[in-house]
């Protein structure tokens, strides 16, 4: 992991950034003497801010996708209400008003100074950001973006065209970072190891080819051309692309901690809910990673079986649904309301009020948020507990890449290769997660490497024994589990691309409307840009999604 003190120093001395837990404005700049102005502008100051804004943007977009795929809990009763235009303002602003605007200002300065590596890093981050925007919104401004004098109301470019430009930007970025040039003053991701920036760029290309495989006959071949050269992409945890958070908290001024930690480790208790479906999936599979992902504040969730094996009484005051009948549209084997062993979360689309449960609901754990490792202690998530929030935002990991390759192998009717790659993905995921227990000095009963390997072997054996859709179901579930806390669109894209897993918990509302195939354009953009027409609904499909329209697809709506 990156040096936490280095990050804190960079943030404090160069930018004075505020890392907060707000969903739409986290990492906003405070008004301060360190803010970039015409007088103090430099490429390095811009690029430090760009890197931080990139992490914020990717985290927010990834969280949106994770709520839709039940990796995270989704509050809204219907899909339209949960993702209405105003709810997407922050993500759009972070990309266009902050990151891309800073790039537009920094690029001429870098060109004049011959800072080719700075230019290359900016192009790679820009490419990844635009690909993420297309995955989320479909057609977006590109050719006329961030040119306010010439194009005050930029048009949207077709998503396919933006994707093609993304590949061009990545190739340009690779060429630039491969040249001789000055290092970045603060490389918050790879510490000026530009071979790793090249690997990231090639990996993003692989991701683009995987995503477009349904509509591009050459995508699989392009993907495999890179995959056949393991030295060219992120094939080892040593090359993982992640953002390191700090542990600094100055109330009302600065919070460098992981935003999920900031939301849950408060004097008033945990501020968020975890997804019941996701916790139950890991519990039923006895996945040892759950002890790292989740921290249980209590040992007995009303209406479930407690950690001691005894039944927990219903408690309508602290968990409304524990005394309510099962929704008639829920199958009998679908988790509802309560998860065993003290895991306390919420069902998909539960928009009820907040009961007095902030000190009993499950909080984020030590991975990736820097929280408390779950040692069966069942205590409160204290303000400075566990790793103090010094977690990471995993953006592109080697485990993700092996899962991508496993999908391509399964598409190519090569289950043996898919199995081997799934095994490699699980191995990398376990190896990534396990050392995080060291962040919590009080961690006990940490699963051994042998125990975690045994679970990975059991999953792969189940995959080998499965046939047809059952293989896709296992690959989908493992893709979702490995991506917990991720800062990318991979699980959401996987779900729209394949329709798996098909056993997702249904929305609590029997008629939640069609699944979100793309997000509305943000209100702040659609309301003022005369060249953007707001979408009629969230069923508008992005260019690479040629599956049946909602509600027929995906089936677990």
Image: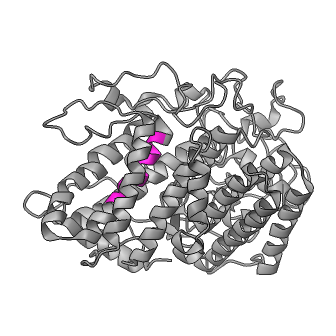
In this view, 258 is above or below 387: above
- Left or right: where does residue 185 sit relative to residue 139? left
Q: Which of 447 and 352 is in front in this view?
A: 447
**Which residue corresponds to the image point at 47% horizontal and 65% vertical from the top-left?**
200
Work out whether residue 11 or residue 452 is closer to the camera in this orientation and state it.
452
Q: Is the magenta stretch mostly helix, strand or loop?
A: helix
Q: Where is residue 149 in the image (x, y as percent from the top left)?
A: 13, 37
Quick check: 36 left or right of 163?
left
Task: Tell me where the magenta segment starts and ends, as one range.
Answer: 123-134
282, above or below 469, in the image: below
Write down the quadrant of residue 512 in the picture: top right
Identity of the residue drawn at 52% across and 33% down: 542
Residue 205 placement (x, y as % from top left): 49, 56
Task: Name the residue at the left extreme.
Answer: 39
* Colouring scheme applied when the structure was drawn: one colour
Q: Is residue 339 in sight in this rendering?
A: no
Relative to 18, is 143 above or below? Answer: above
| Residue 5 placement: quadrant | bottom left
Is 130 within the magenta? yes
Q: In which quarter of the image is the C terminus?
A: top right
- The residue shown at (66%, 59%) is 405
Identified at 30% across, 75% down, the residue is 179
> For the image shown, how many numbered marks are present on the structure?
0
Left-right relation of 193 to 495: left
Residue 509 lies, with reference to residue 178, above or below; the image says above
């Amino acid at each position: 992991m990156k040096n936490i003190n280095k990050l804190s120093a960079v943030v404090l001395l160069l930018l004075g950034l505020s890392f907060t837990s707000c969903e739409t404005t986290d990492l906003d700049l405070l008004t301060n003497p360190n803010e970039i102005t015409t007088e103090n502008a430099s490429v390095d100051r811009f690029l430090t801010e760009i890197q931080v804004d990139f992490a914020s943007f990717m985290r927010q977009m990834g969280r949106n996708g994770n709520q839709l795929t039940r990796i995270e809990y989704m509050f809204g009763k219907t899909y339209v209400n949960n993702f209405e235009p105003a709810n997407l303002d922050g993500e759009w602003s972070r990309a266009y008003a902050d990151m891309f605007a800073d790039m537009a200002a920094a690029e001429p300065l870098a060109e004049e100074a011959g800072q080719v590596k700075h230019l290359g890093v900016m192009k790679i981050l820009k490419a990844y950001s635009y690909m993420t925007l297309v995955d989320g919104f479909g057609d977006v401004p590109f050719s006329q973006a961030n040119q306010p004098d010439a194009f005050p109301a930029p048009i949207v470019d077709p998503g396919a065209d933006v994707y093609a430009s993304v590949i061009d930007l990545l190739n340009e970025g690779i060429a630039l970072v491969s040249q001789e040039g000055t290092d970045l003053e603060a490389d918050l991701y790879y510490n000026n190891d530009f071979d790793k920036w090249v690997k990231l760029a090639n990996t993003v290309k692989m991701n683009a080819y995987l995503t477009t495989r349904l509509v591009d006959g050459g995508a699989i071949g392009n993907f495999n051309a890179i995959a056949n050269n393991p030295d060219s992409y992120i094939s080892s945890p040593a090359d993982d692309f992640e953002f390191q958070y700090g542990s600094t908290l100055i109330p009302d001024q600065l919070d460098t901690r992981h935003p999920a930690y900031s939301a849950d480790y408060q004097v008033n208790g945990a501020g968020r809910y975890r997804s019941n479906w996701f916790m139950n999936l890991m519990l039923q599979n006895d996945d040892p990673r759950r002890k790292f992902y989740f921290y249980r504040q209590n040992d007995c969730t009303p209406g479930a079986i407690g950690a001691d094996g005894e039944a927990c009484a219903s408690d309508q005051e602290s968990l409304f649904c524990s005394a309510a009948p099962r929704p008639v549209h829920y199958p009998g084997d679908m988790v509802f309301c309560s998860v065993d062993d003290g895991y306390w979360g919420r069902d998909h689309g539960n928009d009820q009020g907040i009961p007095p449960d902030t000190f009993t609901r499950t909080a984020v754990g030590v991975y990736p948020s820097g929280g408390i490792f779950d040692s069966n202690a069942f205590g409160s998530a204290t303000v400075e507990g566990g790793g103090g929030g010094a977690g990471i935002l995993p953006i592109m990991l080697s485990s993700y890449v092996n899962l991508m390759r496993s999908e391509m192998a399964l598409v190519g009717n090569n289950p043996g290769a898919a199995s081997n790659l799934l095994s490699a993905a699980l191995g990398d995921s376990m190896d990534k997660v396990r050392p995080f227990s060291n962040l919590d000095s009080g961690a006990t009963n940490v699963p051994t490497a042998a125990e975690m390997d045994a679970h990975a072997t059991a999953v792969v054996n189940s995959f080998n024994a499965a046939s047809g859709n059952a293989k896709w179901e296992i690959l989908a579930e493992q893709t979702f589990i490995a991506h917990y806390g991720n800062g990318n669109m991979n699980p959401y894209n996987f779900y729209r691309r394949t329709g798996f897993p098909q056993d997702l918990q249904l929305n609590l509302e029997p008629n939640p409307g069609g699944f979100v195939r793309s997000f509305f354009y943000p209100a702040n953009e659609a309301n003022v840009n005369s060249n953007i027409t707001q979408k009629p609904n969230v069923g508008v499909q992005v260019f690479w999604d040629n599956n049946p329209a909602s509600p027929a697809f995906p089936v677990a709506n």
